[in-house]
């Protein structure tokens, strides 16, 4: 059976695990390395690159989450539509069965009337002679 994302995840919750937070120590180390003379040049640029990469991953995560939620909504709407189509198909099958039954009954009536007509025609023919 179908479970909507709302039934699995509370409102506002993401189906994806939260992104890992950047380590606080790394930031402090980079700042102290940048401030301390004689340390490796480019440490703050490396930290900036890591921060930029992390922000990029978070943006991608948010974008994918939005796409996932949009797809789940489309899925829900398609499920509703499929349910409506199933119901309509069931109605049409019932109507078709009823029509077939009526047609079968009418064919019996026509067959009976044809028999009576043939019998009456024979009687008329006999009466003329």
Image (spheres, rainbow, N blue to C red):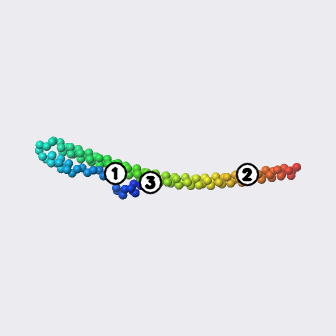
On the rendered structure, is 47 left or right of 7?
left
The reply to whether discs 1 and 2 touch (Cβ–Cβ < 8 Å) is no
Between discs 1 and 2, the one toward the N terminus: 1
> Looking at the image, which residue sits at the far front?
1
| Residue at image location 13% in from the left, 47% down from the top | 35
Q: Nearer the viewer, residue 110 or 19?
A: 19
Q: Picture coordinates of residue 70 (x, y %)?
A: 39, 51
* Residue corresponding to mark 1: 16
Query: Residues under labels 1 and 3: Cα distance?
Result: 19 Å
Query: Residues under labels 2 and 3: Cα distance?
Result: 52 Å
Between discs 1 and 3, the one toward the N terminus: 3
On the rendered structure, is 34 left or right of 57?
left
- Judge depth for marks 2 and 3 and give the one in front: 3
Q: Picture coordinates of residue 50 (x, y %)?
A: 23, 45
Q: Picture coordinates of residue 53 (x, y %)?
A: 26, 45
Instruction: Label 1: state its secondary structure.
Output: loop
Between discs 2 and 3, the one toward the N terminus: 3
Instruction: Label 3: state its secondary structure.
Output: loop
> Looking at the image, which residue sits at the far right?
129
* Residue corresponding to mark 3: 2
On the rendered structure, is 116 left or right of 51?
right
* Residue corresponding to mark 2: 111
| Residue at image location 20% in from the left, 43% down from the top | 46
Instruction: Label 2: state its secondary structure.
Output: helix
| Residue at image location 12% in from the left, 46% down from the top | 36
| Residue at image location 50% in from the left, 54% down from the top | 84
């Amino acid at each position: 059976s179908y479970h909507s994302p709302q039934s699995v995840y509370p409102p506002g919750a993401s189906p994806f695990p939260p992104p890992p937070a950047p380590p606080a120590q790394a930031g402090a180390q980079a700042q102290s390395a940048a401030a301390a003379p004689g340390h490796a040049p480019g440490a703050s640029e490396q930290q900036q690159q890591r921060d930029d990469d992390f922000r990029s991953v978070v943006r991608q995560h948010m974008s994918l989450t939005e796409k996932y939620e949009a797809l789940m909504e489309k899925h829900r709407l398609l499920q509703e539509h499929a349910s409506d189509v199933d119901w309509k198909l069931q109605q049409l099958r019932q109507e078709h069965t009823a029509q077939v039954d009526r047609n079968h009954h009418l064919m019996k009536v026509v067959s009976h009337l044809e028999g009576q007509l043939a019998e009456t025609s024979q009687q008329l023919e006999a009466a003329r002679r």
